[in-house]
Structure formats: structure tokens, C-alpha cells
Amino acid sequence: MTRGGRLRGYLKQHGGALALGATGAVALLASLIGSEAALSRTEFCVSCHSMTYPAEELRDSTHYGALGANPGCKDCHIPQGLANFHRAVATHVFDGARELFLEFTNDYSDIDKFDARRPGMAHHARMNLKRWDSITCRRCHRDPQPPGADARAAHARMRTQKATCIDCHQNLVHAEVPETDLDASLAQGKMVVRGD
């Protein structure tokens, strides 16, 4: 029997199962992509009471409305695009599940109670950006050309010392908390506040 004949025989015998498997795979992929898109909406993020505080801070920040853009939660906190899909899913699975658990086990009924946890949450978000080489920043800020010699020298560090946007640009959008040394935090496996 020729190679083509064997293939036709195999398809004739198993074609229904292959078609069913392919249909199931496409349906699973479509539901995964659809779920990811739904979970990345700002409306979903602020459905938890605690996230209404940072959402207000975003709307009051210089990032909101700048150049006609109104970023949402996902634009900074969820890597976008097909190349980063695995990061987006991992962020929702691990960070989302953790934050959902904390939403139910902590009292965020006022901003003071939220602020008690803010430094840890900010550090966690900063560490994500550090690990991702600030890919969410770079979606909008593709080739920054800062004015001034000091700023240009600082940006040169991005090429020579493996620095990334979040190493220097902390406290841009949300309420200010102590800045963290992200390299030291990675090395020590715990939050290291700058100047400690």
C-alpha cells in the first residue's frame, strides 16, 4: 500500500475523532481568549471594591487623558498581545486568584484599610513589571527620547545594566508609597525599600 493510501485509510477510519478533537481544541482556545479579554476589562477589575481606589487614582493621574489615551488596568498590569498571552493567563491565574482571596479575607471598607496593604501590592506590581522588562510600559512608550543629559544617561542604563522602566519610574499613577530597589528585591527574595 502506498503512503497516500495509508493516510487515506487512517483518515477514513479516524477522521471523525480527528474532526471532533480539532473542533474541541478550537472551542477551548476561543473560550480561553474570550475569558482573557473579559477578565482584562477595567470594569471587571473594579468590580472588587478594593480596586475602585486605584482606578480613581488612575483617572486623576497624568497618564489618563495624555495624548488622548485613557488607559485601563490591563494596559499596565496585564501583558497584551499573542506573544504575551501566556503571561496574561498566568497573571490572571496566580495574581488574580491571590487578590480575589485577599478581597474576601481583608477589610477594604475605607481607603485607610486599603493603604495598609498598598506598599506590598505596589511592590508586587513593580516586580511583575521588572520580570516582564516593563513590556506594558513599552507598548505606549516605544522609543523614549528624554530631554536632558541626566535622563539620557539614565535611559542608557536600560541597555548596559539590564535596567527597565519600572526601576526608575515608580509612583507615577497610584498614591505614593516608598520606592523599592527591584534588583536587591530579586536577589534577596523579599521587598527591599530604597535607602534601607
Image (cartoon, helix red, strand yellow):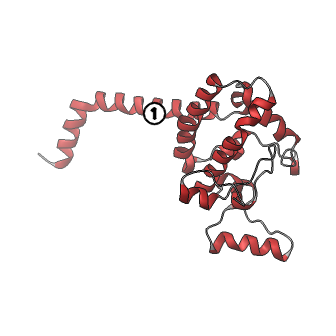
Left or right of residue 191: residue 73: right
State the residue lying farthest toward the left: 1
Number of residues whose C-alpha sits closer than 10 Å to that of mark 1, classed few (under 14), some (14–19) or many (20 or more): few
Left or right of residue 6: residue 46: right
Q: Nearer the viewer, residue 111 or 55?
A: 111
Q: Residue 94, relative to residue 3: is it above or below?
A: above
Work out which quarter of the rendered image holds the N terminus and state it: top left
Q: Residue 188, relative to residue 42: is it above or below?
A: below
Which residue does the image show at 62% across and 34% down from the upper left? Answer: 37
Work out which quarter of the rendered image holds the C terminus and state it: bottom right
Q: Quadrant of residue 166?
A: bottom right
Which residue does the image show at 54% across and 60% down from the upper left? Answer: 187
The amino acid at mark 1 is: Val
Q: Quadrant of residue 164?
A: bottom right
Estimate the x, y position of residue 137 in percent, counting from the top left.
Answer: 71, 54
Q: Residue 81, relative to residue 183: is it above or below?
A: above
Q: Residue 176, relative to residue 147: is it above or below?
A: above
Which residue does the image show at 55% across and 44% down from the upper left? Answer: 85
Left or right of residue 75: residue 15: left
Which residue bears the numbered disc 1?
A: 26
Estimate the x, y position of residue 60 in percent, counting from the top left.
Answer: 88, 41
* Label 1: which secondary element: helix
